[in-house]
Image (cartoon, helix red, strand yellow):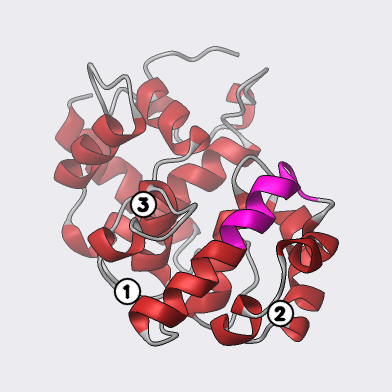
Amino acid sequence: MRKKEKISFLLDYFQKNQPDVQSELQYKNPYQLLVATMLAAQCTDKRVNMVTPALFEAYPTPLEMSKASVEEILSFVKSVSYPNSKAAHLSAMSKMLVSDFGGEVPATMEELTSLPGVGRKTANVVLAFAFGQAAMPVDTHVFRVAHRLGLVKDAPTPDAVEKQLVKLFPTEYISRAHHWLLLHGRYICTARKPHCDECPIREACEENIG
């Protein structure tokens, strides 16, 4: 199956079966999504969703968070992975939002990645799902599935995978394609012992591991 045929096949399947795919992170605005996505690095969405309600109640805006000490923020996020560095990043990020962006989350890649603790993947999540832009965040699941399906070639880094996937998918589907690939990798095309017998898009796969 050629790449164009694969894309058509994948779009047809996912549009029919997962038309309204949404992030599993719980958020109400760009600020909350930014914070949740920063906390989700190398951590499960389920764990982050357990932490953020109390965090957002204590610090409903960047201004409130900017006034908190790192230790105070840490008390809310201590159960996530790498809590010390994430608390420090949240503190510095919120201060910069207030000082440089009027307390508002910016809507460009350049501005978002200027924030402490915000890399390209996190910025892409915010651009895609807070601002509705055509962005392709590449996490470990998207990276793995893209390679197993043969959608990318000679793409050893997340940035390289992102560039190739953005060219493959029609603009209006790029953000949703991220979620389709992510959830497929999270629940079916898992890193260890992928559930190939249950895979509904197996005919597009180049590995068929299971």
Q: Quadrant of the C terminus?
A: top right
Q: Quadrant of residue 159?
A: top left
For discs 3 and 2, the disc positioned in front in the rendered view: 2
Whole-percent x, y for residue 154 in the image = 23, 16
Left/right placement of residue 94 relative to residue 170 reads right
Q: CA distance from mark 3 to mark 2?
A: 29 Å
Q: CA distance from mark 1 to mark 3?
A: 13 Å
Instruction: Verify whether residue 89 appears in magenta.
Output: yes
Callout 2 crowding tier (Cα within 10 Å): few <14, some 14–19, many ≥20: some
Q: Residue 60: tell me if it is visible.
A: yes
Q: Quadrant of residue 174?
A: bottom left
Q: Nearer the viewer, residue 28 or 113?
A: 113
Left/right placement of residue 13 relative to residue 169 reads right
Q: Are marks 1 and 3 in contact (CB under 8 Å)?
A: no
- Give the answer, above or below, for where 71 lies relative to 42: below
Q: Nearer the viewer, residue 208 or 47?
A: 47
Whole-percent x, y for residue 141 in the image = 51, 35
Magenta residue span: 80-90
Task: Say which element carries label 2.
Answer: helix
Residue type highlighted by circle 1: Gly
The mark found on residue 56 in the picture is 2
Task: Say which element carries label 1.
Answer: loop
- Give the answer, above or below, for where 202 lies relative to 210: below
Residue type highlighted by circle 2: Phe
Q: Earlier in the sequence, mark 1 or mark 2?
A: 2
